Amino acid sequence: MTAPRLAVDPIVEARRHWEEHGWSDAAEGMAAVTSIMRAQQLVLARVDEVLRPLELTFARYELLMLLHFSRTGALPVTKASTRLQVHPTSVTNAVDRLEAAGLVERRRNPTDGRGILVALTPAGRALALKATERLNAEVFEQVGLAPRRTGTLLSVLTELRRSAGDLA
Amino acid sequence: MTAPRLAVDPIVEARRHWEEHGWSDAAEGMAAVTSIMRAQQLVLARVDEVLRPLELTFARYELLMLLHFSRTGALPVTKASTRLQVHPTSVTNAVDRLEAAGLVERRRNPTDGRGILVALTPAGRALALKATERLNAEVFEQVGLAPRRTGTLLSVLTELRRSAGDLA
DNA sequence: GTACTTTACCTGGACGTCCAGGTACCTTGA
DNA sequence: TCAAGGTACCTGGACGTCCAGGTAAAGTAC
């Protein structure tokens, strides 16, 4: 984080401006959207800080864990893309870097000549578990909310994702 | 959005895996963090879709609105960086593009020879208001939550941001 | 008043995200 | 069987974010 702490919350400030401009119906939604953006930025920064010494990023970590949880430790790019809910090229990008670090490898897909399988290496699996230990201890076990509140957040965000067509 | 809808929520799935691995203390936090990431991705996509016809992005829109709400319509880069809570180079980047589009201009800062002022042009102000109209109607007034839930989300995220040192 | 430190901004680069476009392969239907 | 359409992956590029490093000006201290 670079910026100094602020006396006034920019989001509260923006909401006040919205009200004053007669955009009251949109003020709360604007504040919610902006808060999500900012929360993501903060949480991602915390996560990446923990992962930096391991030379991982959250995107790459997620891919490693997806492979770790898969039966064979190998998945086609498309499958990974769907599960991670990112664009296929984002997966290609992550695989490039993980492959260069020896954490995954690309294999020919025996059942589909067009495709490849992204396969976890032993080093990749070991690093994924190490990263999980640290993330659990330093971020996930202390997100920064009162006990019940984490569940509340989860529930509201699930509703939001569902309404955005993210879930069935 | 590219990926097809999934039968199972990847976040629910991941949480189950966490529980099964004996990481129960971290499972809910992991789910919360992942949900924030995904929610941000979805909301940003909605916002950018509305802004695309105007050749704006959310980052640039936010800068335009910050200037619009400022007394003189002009701010130093550092001030904008602090208010928007992004790195100063992100502001430089946004200013480059907005300036190329004639929406802002760089002026010498009369009170500080090192600095510049980013000043809103009439075109920039007009576009900011037009963009706000559309964002209000198409996103902010219908975030996708039941009425009371938006307030709940806002309250929890504020708690999260405060605990991350984002607020005073 | 001069030397040291800090501040403001920029450049260059890494990374993740998406989109557009291209190639190789599979699938489908006549 | 074979042509048309769809799928899987990659490359190249745009964009936003951050970091590292550099220059110029302001502030501070002796």
Image: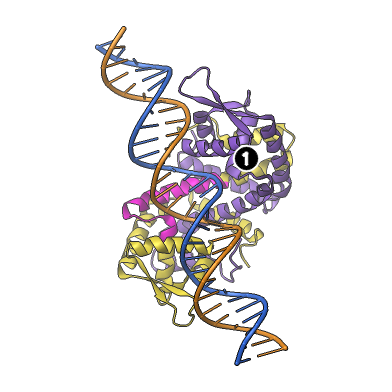
Chain colours: A yellow, B purple, C orange, D blue
Residue for point 66% across, 59% down = A163
- In terms of depth relative to the viewer, which is nearer, B72 or B8? B72
Q: Is residue A81 magenta?
A: no
**Does any portion of residue B100 appear in the rendered image?**
yes
> Image check: A135 left or right of A77?
left
- In terms of depth relative to the viewer, which is nearer, B87 or A33? B87
Residue B101 picture location, percent across and down? 63, 38
Q: Which residues are magenta?
A: A36-61
What secondary structure prevails in the magenta region?
A: helix
> Image check: C28 left or right of B94?
right
Residue for point 43% across, 56% down = A58
- In terms of depth relative to the viewer, which is nearer, B16 or C22? C22
Q: Quadrant of the N terminus of chain B?
A: bottom right
> Image check: B7 left or right of A139?
right
Q: Is residue B51 above or below residue B88?
A: below
Residue at numbered disc 1: B61
